[in-house]
Each structure stands twice: as C-alpha cells, then as structure tokens.
Amino acid sequence: TNWFPDFWYNSLLHTTAPQVIVPDSKLIQHMNASNMVRLRIGNLEYMLFALGQLLQVVRAANGAQYIIQPQQSVVLQQQVIPQMQPGGVQAPVIQQVLAPLPGGISPQTGVIIQPQQILFTGNKTQVIPTTVAAPTPAQAQITATGQQQPQAQPAQTQAPLVLQVDGSGDTSSEEDEDEEEDFDDDDDEEEDKEKDGAEDGQVEEEPLNSEDDVSDEEGQELFDTENVVVCQYDKDGIMNLNGRDYIFSKAIGDAEW
Amino acid sequence: MAYGLYRNTTLGNSLQESLDELIQSQQITPQLALQVLLQFDKAINSRLVQRVRNRANFRGSLNTYRFHDNVWTFVLNDVEFREVTELIKVDKVKIVACDGKNTKKHRRDFLKFILALQK
C-alpha cells in the first residue's frame, strides 16, 4: 500500500543538476526497506524515502545503480509512521536528509503538514502547496533537516519552503482537502473573515449612521403605472406616458437635479 | 445587432405575452419565440430610424441618474413632455437610454476580443 497520496506517485519531482553521485552499494546497506519506496515514472526510477527525500536512480550500462542526490532537497513532509526507525543511517550524504528527528518521535504525535504537489512541466519545477486536513489538534511541523551533524553542504540554495499553519490548514474550519484550489480557498476565507468583521462593525454603528440615508429607493414598486421612455442616446425612442405610447426621432429636455 | 431595448413597450410587451401564450399551448417552440423577438428588435430599430421624424421636448426635475454598462437610467419627477400636437404631464418617469452610436463598432470590437482570447 502506498504511504502517500497517489498523486505524489504520479508526480515527477525534477530537481536541478545533481551534485553528488553516490555509488549504490554505499547507500543500500543503510537503507531500510521499510522507509523507502521505489517509484518508476516513465523511464525514470526514483527512490522515495520516508522523510520525503526523492532520489533519482540511474542505471549504468553495466547494471550498476547510481543514486543521484539533487542539489536542492525539496522537503516533502508526511505523517509520521510509528514504525519508522530514526537513525541508523551513517552515510554522510544521506544523513543530511535522513537525520533522526530531534528528540525522537512519539507515535502519538500526529504530524500532518502540507504535502507539496510537485508538477513536472517540461524542465521546470512547479511546487503547488496543498493542504491536508489535520486529524489531530496538535500540528507539529517537522522539517527533516539534519541537526545532529553540521551540514556538509548548504541545505538549499533557494528560499525554504514556507509551511502554512493557518487558513485552509486550520483545524477550526471544516474545509476538506483541496489539492489545487488552495489559493482560492484562502482568498474566500479571507473575504469571509472580512465580511464578518464588517457585519459586526455595522451592527454596532447602525444607530449612528441610519440617519444618513435620505433617498428612498428609486425602484419603489416598479409597476407599469410608472411612465417609461426607452430610447438610444442621440437617436430615436418610444415613450409610454400615462398608458399611451408616443414616439420620437429626437427628444431634448432639461432636468435639474 | 439591435438592442432589445424596445421590448418593454406596449408593442413589445404584447408581442412577448402572445409568444408566451403560444409557447404555453405548445404551438411554437421557445427557440422560435426568441427568433421572433430578435426579428422584432431589428424591425423596430430600423423603422424608428426610417419612419419617425418628430421631435419631443421635456422638462422636469431629476431624481436619480445612473450610467452603467453604457446605459443611462434616469428617474425624473414632475415632468412635462411637449410634442407638437400635445402636452403630457407625469409625476414620475423613468428614462432608459442605450448608446445609439457605434453599435456596429461595438459588435466588431466584441468579435475582435473573442478572437484575441482564443489565441
């Protein structure tokens, strides 16, 4: 069974030029089958690790496998699985990504962060933040960065991903998971909040401002008793006055406001 | 493309009511009724231009004015309309005026806009 939403498997994570190529044998012995999944997308193979690191697998002509570590690690965060084993990885390259989480993780901690939907469009990477409704009230956000060892390489060359704790991810709201409409939800929610605020303001101020309205409604009971002139400006028209129809090719008038 | 402006006249309303009756009794389809109304629009617009030559004047007080989507809407009070033959007084009148010039230009521009969208 898949750990992650299906669309993750269908998405392609394509990163910038690889920085390190590590021979397969070094890695595999430290990999734990329970925290790694192999993906094949098109012609490309990937290894997706529990903490979200996605490594591309390249097979050489002689059958050897090479793991390419992308220069920037796009951190995908997911629900902590109780049987995940922290630690146990000694390869310096991998440790950067798979370092044990600080303080260990208690199985009771339900950590839901927002998975990012990665879309592969040509050569570009698009990261579309998505939201997942949090099943537990406590939302602890954990970034899988190595903390026990000094970073061997600069972690990310681009701006770190900003995780959202409010808005659509808010547990107080009843919003369902909306994968690609996150932005719309945010906008709608902001508008709703503003409206609520405005209404509250108005209720308090109504006694004060109610005298400002002088005009009555223009369309009070628009019966046909109301005389109507329909025309085009600078052209002809038809009038219905006192129940009779009149016509003109040009009408000119004065009215003071 | 003529305005459906004149449908809200005695003539236009009578036509619409008749068409509605025919639709109710299922003697014509709604599509046909729509075509009839479109033809009415064309006919009345062109006839007004061709056949009507008289002028009218009016004077009153302006209650409200509105300009939206190129349509003027006025509400006047205590208005006197003057035609050559007669004088008409009303307490309240609503004047709806669409843009009479450049109707063809609007259609052309609209088509251009649609085509541009598809590129």
Image (tube, coloured by chain):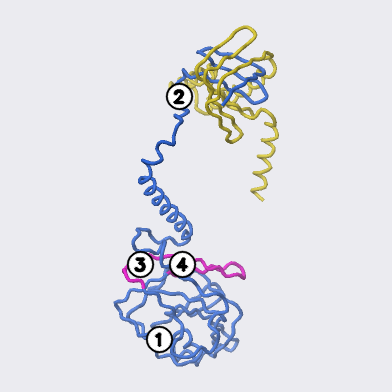
Chain colours: A blue, B yellow
Does B99 sit above or below residue A14? above
Label 2 lies in what chain? A
Q: Which residue is mark 4?
A: A7
Q: Which residue is mark 2?
A: A222
- Report the span colored magenta: A114-139
Q: Earlier in the sequence, mark 2 or mark 4?
A: 4
**Crowdedness near tag 4: few (<14), some (14–19) or many (≥20) residues, C-alpha within 10 Å:** few
Would you identify the image quadrant in which residue B35 lies?
A: top right
Residue A133 part of the magenta-drawn span:
yes
Label 4 lies in what chain? A
**Crowdedness near tag 1: few (<14), some (14–19) or many (≥20) residues, C-alpha within 10 Å:** many
A30 relative to B40 in the view: left or right: left
Of residues A12 and B101, the one drawn nearer to the viewer in this rendering: B101
Q: Secondary structure at mark 2?
A: loop
Q: Amino acid at mark 4?
A: Phe
Q: Secondary structure at mark 3?
A: loop
Image quarter where the N terminus of chain A lies is bottom left
Disc 1 from disc 3: Cα separation: 23 Å
- Residue B40 coordinates in the image, percent (x, y): 59, 22
Label 3 lies in what chain? A
Would you identify the image quadrant in which residue B112 lies?
A: top right
**Crowdedness near tag 3: few (<14), some (14–19) or many (≥20) residues, C-alpha within 10 Å:** some
Badge 2 and badge 1 in a common chain: yes
Contact between labelled residues 1 and 4, with CB atoms less than 8 Å apart = no
Q: Amino acid at mark 2?
A: Leu
Q: Earlier in the sequence, mark 4 or mark 1?
A: 4
Q: Which residue is mark 1?
A: A100
Q: Nearer the viewer, mark 2 or mark 3?
A: 2
Badge 2 and badge 4 in a common chain: yes
Q: Amino acid at mark 1?
A: Pro
Q: Amino acid at mark 3?
A: Ala
